[in-house]
Amino acid sequence: MNIFDPVPLPFPIGRPIIGAPMAGGPSTPELVAAVTNTGGMGFLAGGYKTPQQLSAQITATRSLTTGPIGVNLFVVSANDVDEDELEAYRQELQHDADRYGTRVGSPRRDDDFWSGKLEVIRDLRPDVVSFTFGCPDAGVLHELARMGIHTAATVTSPAEARTAAERGAGILIVQGPDAGGHRATFDPAEEPGTDPLPEVIAAIRKAVELPLIAGGGISTREQVRAVLDTGVAAVQLGTALLLADEAGTNPAHRSALQDPAFTETKVTRAFTGRPARGLRNRFMDDHPGSGHAYPQIHYMTAPLRAAAAASNDLQGLHLWAGTGYRNTRTGAAAGIVEALTP
């Protein structure tokens, strides 16, 4: 095999484009189906949904397409929380709560309905299930494989890639440093790598021999072509689809992506405790040291983000976006996917 020949995906797609799962609203059945119906494959975001909501969305997506669809689940590991650090951040957030006339949320840990969502996957059997923030144990991956469900682990480094391969993941989704939203690092306390996506892909290709999907900050046809030329089987697009007609991106987020007042993106832990890239705003700058307690910090800032949204305060919202956000365009998802395909 030539060094640049990709390991093919274990299922056919007509176009090497994957619609990234975007939790919190942007990923809708309509968006997923549109990407699939254009020849690629769309992913539903299972994060932050109840099992019942996820089941309804998978069913709705199946009614809109006969092609392959994917579902993404969060793997929320147990964490060792520094209670003093968490309390210090709660006190820091009180200023924001006072600004909006609301309260700081109570920090709590949950596993994002892990068991219930696995039951949904077993019942409805999407074509692919991907995992973010970690890799399930071998038993889960092997069980899904026996059921004919392809499994994919989102990774950011060769070490994570080796772990996923050893446990039985069939596909790796390589996330580069320019990606919008949460970085997929397995350890929430770890600072995410900054090596450019092509270098990350090359290092992972040396570490394991699995089909690779890669993404992060990709927003032009030329960038898609360049990433495909590194030997991946497909390219994953997220931010590029945020303004699509079918996306569930909220009006404030849509407005910010097109607002010239936002001039750069930044990685922050301020909103959730996990590193995530979004449009740089006041909240990020005001809170440079939140700690890494995820999902506890996510729940602490939830009322503040809701209040900011209610008052249309773009400076207090988590406006996830990759570095290529300036190229994000409006219109039907099919047209966006076609325009980005080499």
Image (spheres, grey):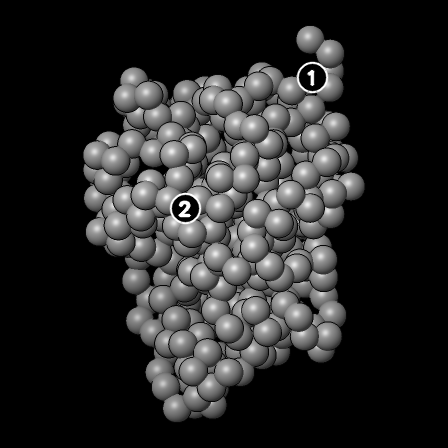
Identified at 45% across, 46% down, the residue is 32
**Residue 127 — which label?**
none
Would residue 154 be seen by someone viewing this image from the given angle?
Answer: no
Q: Amino acid at mark 1?
A: Asp
Q: Is residue 229 above or below residue 192?
A: above
Q: Which residue is mark 2?
A: 44
Horizontal arrangement in the rendering, residue 266 relative to residue 117 (left or right): right
Identify the element where label 1 is drawn.
loop
Residue 12, how many percent across, how many down? 50, 23
Viewed as shown, does residue 270 lie left or right of 222?
left
Q: Position of residue 154 (x, y in %)?
A: 50, 37
* Quadrant holding the C terminus: top right
Q: Is residue 108 above or below residue 226?
A: below
Asked if one can make out residue 326 in the rendered structure from this viewpoint, the answer is: yes
Q: Residue at x 51, y 73 (%)?
A: 251
CA gap between label 2 and label 1 equals 29 Å
**Residue bearing mark 1:** 5
State the residue in front, 45 or 85. Answer: 45
217 with respect to 49 (left or right): right
